Image (cartoon, rainbow, N blue to C red):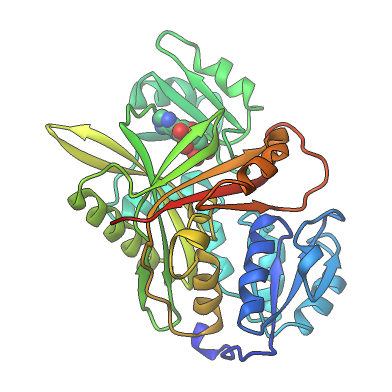
Amino acid sequence: MANDFPILKPGSTLGILGGGQLGRMLALAAARFGLRCHVFSPEKESCAFDIAYAKTCASYEDEAALTRFADSCDLITFEFENVPAETADFLVTNKKAVLPDPAILATTQDRLAEKHFLTDFEIKTAPYAEISSDVDLPVAIVQVQAPAVMKTRRLGYDGKGQAVVSQGDDPAAAWKAIGEVPAILEGFVDFDLEISVVAARGRDGSFAAFEPTENIHRDHILHKSIVPANITPAVAKEAVSIARKIADELKYVGVLAVEMFVVPKDGKYELLVNEIAPRVHNSGHWTIDGANVSQFEQHVRAVAGWPLGRPRRIGQVEMTNLIGDEIESWKKFAALPNTAVHVYGKGEARPGRKMGHVTRVTPED
Ligand code: AMP
């Protein structure tokens, strides 16, 4: 289907569903290629609006607004994986050109469907069990064993919709804590580190990955990304081949990120996939300043039907998120050598809100 869509030429309009910092950085990358971006977001204060050629502020359920938006775009993509399924269906049914294929969202929006997908393709994950009603709780805890994490199937991010079940805990308490909604119980993984692979797949099936990134979280939110990750070349190769398998099986077009746990096992390391993000990803922000092609440029190239760039890192890289009022220190970072400051132009610096990031690139000899 992707091959039926027009190849975007400079001057074309790329629609972006979602108006956060990912949309903003995508639009900035698209602008370099002479593409115009039309941003669709339900939130008035969307920071991608500030730099877009056109904007629509309407709900994802507003079919008239969606139609007008789609008619003004040559191709549509998204920066946000929780685009409602009805919105995706509406665009597909009305034959709008959307990449990556929104059908993929059915798999990645639902932690259970995602785990089944990975298991079907023999990609390892933490042990898991389905919780659809309280009847499932005793079976799940025997199957998975505490310690475990209960996660809502849908709409969880940055640790939201999660509750830990320690040894001896009643899993019913965790289920209550997450609102007694459909969930999975996942075995707690004693990992050495967390990594992600940010990779692109083109319309023609071409594939290009950035080097695996080591990710350090604070309060469940990404704090730092470090590249190269502290893993062996064999683990790095395996991580990239897992990401490639996922992208190929999904017939994916665009940039995706695969988060993995690196777990010591029998004197070696095993990789367990935690999550697939069908979009550009926070752990790929380092590529703007630390590589010859950024994840945002790669995504634009992939969906536009252009050749993918060949990513090459240009130094040792450390990306640090500026969360909440940490953004106040932008001036301090702006004075440091080899340091790029990114401010997303959002309004209020609420606790936990991603306001910007800084990337330090130390040239390698
Ligand atoms: P998630 O929302 O699934 O990406 O989880 C957010 C973070 O919680 C992960 O990046 C891990 O640091 C931690 N986490 C999630 N699942 C597990 C698990 N099964 N075992 C250990 N830590 C986990």
The residue closer to the viewer here, 310 or 95, is 310
Q: Residue at x 33, y 46 (%)?
A: 229
Query: Residue 247's image quarter?
Result: bottom left
Identity of the residue furthest to the left in this view: 267
* 127 sits left or right of 184 in the view: left
Residue 250 location (% of width, % of height) = 42, 66
Is residue 193 placed above or below 68 in the rendered structure? Answer: above
Q: Residue at x 59, y 91 (%)?
A: 6
Occupied quadrant, residue 320: top right
* Whether residue 130 is visible: no
| Image location of residue 114, percent across then percent down | 45, 50
Percent position of residue 289, x then y: 51, 60
Asked whether residue 193 is in view, the answer is yes
Q: Is residue 238 above or below residue 263?
A: below
Which residue is painted at 83% across and 59% down in the image? 59
Say left or right for 72 vs 309.
right
Question: Looking at this view, is 164 or 142 the one in front?
Answer: 164
Query: Residue 54 at x, y = what percent?
Result: 82, 75
